[in-house]
Amino acid sequence: MDIAFADWLNLIFRWLHVIAGIAWIGSSFYFIFLDLSLRKRRELPPGVGGEAWNVHGGGFYLMQKYTVAPAEMPEELHWFKYEAYFTFLSGFALMSVIYYWGADAYLIDPEIADLTQFEAIVLSIGFLSGGWIVYDILCRLPLLIKHDWLLSVAVFALILLVAVGTTNVFSGRAAFVHVGAVVGTIMVANVFFIIIPNQKIVVADLIAGRKPEARLGQEAKQRSTHNNYLTLPVLLMMISTHFPMIFSHEQSWVVVALILVVGGIIRDYFNKKNAGRSGNALKWQWPAAATFMAGLILFVSHDPAAGSRQDVTVPDPSVVLAISQTHCATCHAARPSDPDFDEAPGGVHLETVDDLRKYSAKILQQSVLTRAMPLGNQSKMTREERDLLGVWIRAGMPDGASE
């Protein structure tokens, strides 16, 4: 009996990652909503900064928030932390199975940086840990503590620097996932190193009869707010592997920037709405998000080299076939020579000129426009070879060379 261990581990960790992520994002979104929906009313208990009525599942709930903490420790206290921890642990396990175990196929692109598996993994872990360290330092700088908008700009710039760095050492697919993973690590580290420890200090102070510091709650709320605004961009980055046109752009840091802006604007709309804002405060977000999204689509779709190809000689089909046999037919064949495949992926065969014509649209998309194939560029397909494929396909796949 043959068991595909890598595939099963991929499935198990991916499933767990999705489940934990849903639980974490759900609770995070709810508590941000709750915090913003609190209203100050008369005759609130001492220390309560606001309350909100909720209705769900046929019942009514009265939610109250203490500005710092209640006078006494409640008998039962529910914590929300394991959702975040399991999201990180399952995500790191999934990355290990896909990008560390399969580094040659998914993490390393020799055309970008000819790394060894060990070097690539060390760099990957370095980005994850280094991103959190730099972010935490930024959040502790006195100047940035006083100005939230300036801190937001600094975090935005940090994420773009990560995007530039990863795209210069990893494959396009791995680079984009790593940007999302770095941001996700920052979010989990906020919970593990700041939010939960601060809450534990408050609880300890209550038990000891001391008055907790308001600073602890304020710091935890700041980090929680950061997590809230980063959630939507991270979600898109983590599913980007299904959309090569996103991660394959040569200036993918611009793509990351636009995704951050679109996701942040959408999140801002819901936060302001939950806070009870109306009118002009809610009129600009969706038009702005749609405008930036249109800009993202146009930027990704623009091919700056298209004009330079008009005078390029259309290659002979034999040249195109030779490229395919070198870089594509090792997997896409009736009997693949690549040991990782027993049959052609997706049933696509690229062994003859007729095969190339039949699947020309897929070849153009995967090998020319997005450069997602060959997988991990293990055969070191050059940009010149990709351009030749594109010229031949765009010229209508003629039988012989022409101008």
Image (spheres, rainbow, N blue to C red):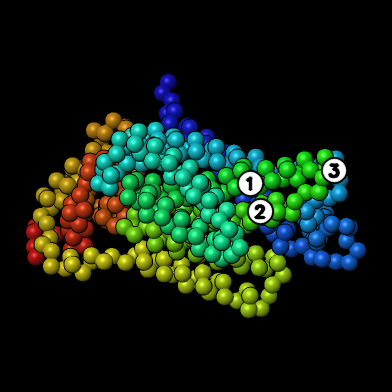
Taking depth in this image into account, of 372 and 334 the one nearest to the observer is 372
At 61% from the left and 68% from the top, the residue drawn is: 269
Discs 3, 2 touching: Cβ within 8 Å: no
Q: CA distance from mark 2 to mark 1?
A: 8 Å
Spot occupied by residue 319 in the image (x, y as percentages of width and height): 12, 50
In the displayed orientation, state which residue is furthest to the front: 142
Could you say whether the residue bearing mark 3 is in a helix, strand or loop?
Answer: loop
Q: CA distance from mark 1 to mark 3?
A: 22 Å
- Quadrant of the image containing the N terminus: top left
Discs 2, 1 touching: Cβ within 8 Å: yes
Residue 338 sits in quarter: top left
Discs 1, 3 touching: Cβ within 8 Å: no
In the displayed orientation, state which residue is furthest to the right: 43
Numbered badge on residue 342: none
Spot occupied by residue 78 in the image (x, y as percentages of width and height): 76, 43
At 69% from the left and 55% from the top, the residue drawn is: 218
Numbered badge on residue 209: 3
Q: Which residue is mark 2?
A: 219
Spot occupied by residue 257 in the image (x, y as percentages of width and height): 44, 62
Tell me: 372 left or right of 10: left
Tell which circle, 3 or 2, labels the residue nearer the N-terminal end. 3
Q: Which residue is mark 1?
A: 194
Q: Amino acid at mark 3?
A: Gly
Q: Is residue 271 visible?
A: yes
Taking depth in this image into account, of 90 and 76 the one nearest to the observer is 76
Q: Callout 1: few (<14), some (14-19), or many (20+) C-alpha neighbours within 10 Å?
A: some
Residue 139 sits in quarter: bottom right
Could you say whether the residue bearing mark 1 is in a helix, strand or loop?
Answer: helix
Tell which circle, 1 or 3, labels the residue nearer the N-terminal end. 1
At 84% from the left and 57% from the top, the residue drawn is: 47
At 20% from the left and 57% from the top, the residue drawn is: 387
